Amino acid sequence: MTTPDTFQFDAERKQLDEVELRRQIDKLIEALRAKDLDGVKRQYLTDVVSFDVEPPLQHVGIAAKLENWANVFLLFESVDYEIRDLTFTVGDDVAFGHAFARLHGTLKNGAITNGMWVRATFGMRKIDHTWLIAHDQVSVPFDIQSGSGVVDLEP
């Protein structure tokens, strides 16, 4: 039987978990801005499955995820990464979140790029009291008639 104390405890635990989830995403953003692949690696499970904007359709494992970011870091002199409207739904040891994200910065050739806003989804698992990314997906909307991605939208 559940009591008011049980509901209060669950609500407090979920609030604490959400703080930790946001902290993990903040650590990811810090690592991306620092072009720190080890820092990026610490935010993911080793068997992460990623549906990124770059082919193939699916990237499996931390090595594939890090290869994507290493390729980005080769292009950029300085990286900025921004997330807006991050929302989480939290369970005991599984959570999912969604947001808008944008990668931008200065390319190695000196050009400044404003990037594009994408839709980002995070599937998180709590392992040994730490929330880690088990799945992520990044996508852009597309125009059905032309079949082209729509990359000029903003949240």
Image (tube, helix red, strand yellow):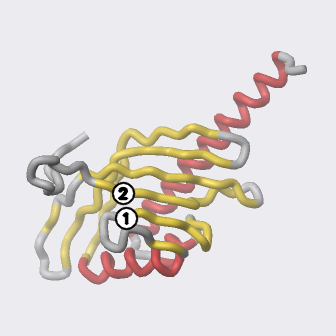
Residue 67 in picture, x, y percent from top left: 41, 81
**Residue at mark 2:** 138
Please state the total of marks drawn on the protein image. 2
Answer yes or no: do the residues labelled 2 and 1 have beta carbons within 8 Å?
Answer: yes
Can you name the residue that lies furthest to the top here?
4
Q: Specify whether 4 is left or right of 22.
A: right
Q: Does 21 appear above or below 7? A: below
**Residue at mark 1:** 52
Of the numbered discs 2 and 1, the one sitting upstream in the chain is: 1
Look at label 1 and name its amino acid. Asp
Q: How crowded is mark 1: few (under 14 residues within 10 Å), some or many (20 or more)?
A: some
The secondary element bearing badge 2 is classed as strand
Q: Specify whether 131 is left or right of 137.
A: right
Q: Specify whether 25 is left or right of 148.
A: right
Residue 148 in picture, x, y percent from top left: 14, 56
Q: Which residue is drawn at 36% across and 57% down?
A: 138
Look at label 2 and name its amino acid. Val
The secondary element bearing badge 1 is classed as loop
- Mark number displayed over residue 123: none
Residue 112 in picture, x, y percent from top left: 14, 67
Q: Residue at x 30, y 62 (%)?
A: 80
Q: How crowded is mark 2: few (under 14 residues within 10 Å), some or many (20 or more)?
A: some
Q: In which quarter of the image is the C terminus?
A: top left
- Which residue is at the front of the view, 150 or 90? 150
Q: Residue at x 54, y 75 (%)?
A: 61
Can you name the residue that lies furthest to the right here?
1
